[in-house]
Image (cartoon, rainbow, N blue to C red):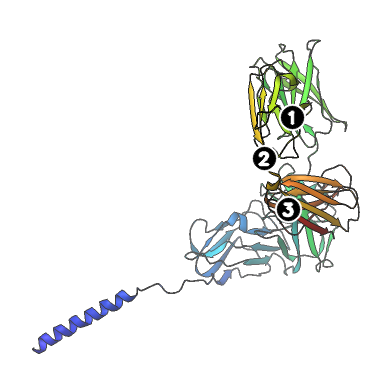
Amino acid sequence: MNKRSNLLWSTLLLLILVVSCAKKGSITGGEKDETPPVFVKAFPPNFSTNFKANEIRIYFDEYIKLKEAQKQIIVSPPMDPKPTITPLGGASKFVKIKFLDTLLQNTTYSINFGESIEDNNEGNTQPFFRYVFSTGDFLDSLHIKGTITDAIKKEAEPNITVALYEVDENYSDSLIFNTVPRYITNTLDSTEFNFYNLKKGKFKLIALKDQAGNYKYEPKQDKIGFYEEIVSLPEDTAKIFNLNIFKETLAFKALLPKQISKNEFVFPYEGEVDSMKIKLLSKAPDTLETLVIADKETDSLHYWFKPFFKADSLIFEVSNSKKYRDTLVTRFKDQYKDSIQISSSGTTLALNKNFVFSSITPLDTIDEKRITLTDKDTIDVPFSIALDKTSNEAELIFEKSENNRYNMTILPESILDFVGNTNDTIYFRFLTKKLADYGTIFFTLENVETYPVIVQVTNEKQDIITEKTVRNQETLTFDYLEPSKYYVRVIFDSNDNGKWDPGNFLKGIQPEKVSYFPEIIDVRANWEIKQTFILE
């Protein structure tokens, strides 16, 4: 073999070797970049004094983007209009902040970026970067911190705005409704808050679940929490403040009613109904009868009347026991008459509950003789019916047995409603479970300083499953519980009105205290669980 052939075979062998090695693995881009963007410089420099610029540029060592800028970036004191901040939707090696508002004199400003700054490729975050400057000769340097809790829920919501209002000769509590605060911060995704670069002085400390994002308290939609005393700086810098947020009960106000059927108006309202009364002022027949029923889901009353009469509009007077009085005018016309529509509480009946049925029209009379109830063996079951016209519900009362099936037949014209409708034939079928399908919690409270307290069992969404009022030391029994996970909370019912009361900011009233049993309780079928809650 000649030299040329040897060279050819050597080259071919080398190619085979390279291909073989290539098959064993593939070339990668190396290890994933987990390094967050690094701050390089800023113009003007961070922590500048005697600041006079109308634009800031903050540079990083790689291309960055801003994530959820409107939510994450907090400028304190707040500006109106807010500064423009870029990039939004793109990538850049610098953040540009352009001021559209005149800066206050001798004021320290803080721009907290939260977790908005992340690199363009991997999404690595530069957490809680702050740019600080002063329009005066020095930077304010005082600091306070605290936590947010929810007054009734086990955990507070994220993204709570926390505000400091300067208490001076112009301060009043009503400022929170129409004036932006001196300083703001945000809990973002935690329940903790921090204020930095505060000046010496006296402040009112407020927390808001600020739905509109305008730093003003709107009671219809916002939750609020407040520190009762005035915060004095620097004296209070060592404190850890807790703000307990709640949804205030609005002052009562009747809203414009609306006719929704031939014989029915709906009267919506704000606040607590508090013995709300509705009086027709317009001319009506001498035989007029009226009935008012509270809606089960919305803040409104259903106003029923008979007989129908003609008018272009009606005038109503609405009043309550707290000297509220208002006159409301609404249009009035002939409409379709509602028919009776009976619905039930469900197809499974707990052994400690009664079967309940209701109608969209007000129930007036029920003829029990035209109703039958049988069990799974088609044996007649004795029963009685209790009609509650205020709630527009009827309860079927009978002796229940476990693991049974029941059939209820309501013959035509058994039920008469307020406006003269009667029913067609109605069938209800429902069943009971075995007693062993349920679980029981035996719950004992210790170290209760004042009674009464309300003990509530809730599901994981914190909807109330059952509750009991406690007036002395005893062990509570919560039985017939479906297998599930439950929370137990204790409400300190200080005014003994049988419910939890929120606070009121303008009156300086904090919400009633609520304590949660620290563990979630896992109830299983045919189980009995004993728990003791030592209150603090």
Residue 176 x/y as whole percent: 77, 49
Q: Which residue is mark 2?
A: 403
Under circle 1, the secondary element is strand
Residue plotted at (79% across, 16% down): 289
Mark 3 or 2, closer to the camera: 2
Amino acid type, residue under disc 1 in the picture: Leu
Q: Position of residue 333 (x, y in %)?
A: 67, 15
Amino acid tagged 3: Tyr
Q: On the picture, is 97 further left or further right than 496?
A: left
Mark pair 1, 2: CA separation: 18 Å
* Quadrant location of the C terminus in the rendered image: bottom right
Q: Nearer the viewer, residue 217 or 122?
A: 122
Give the label, 1 or 3, closer to the camera: 1
Earlier-in-chain disc, 3 versus 2: 2
Residue occupying image coordinates x 54% and y 58%:
86
Task: Give the residue number, with chain letter if any, for mark 3.
Answer: 487
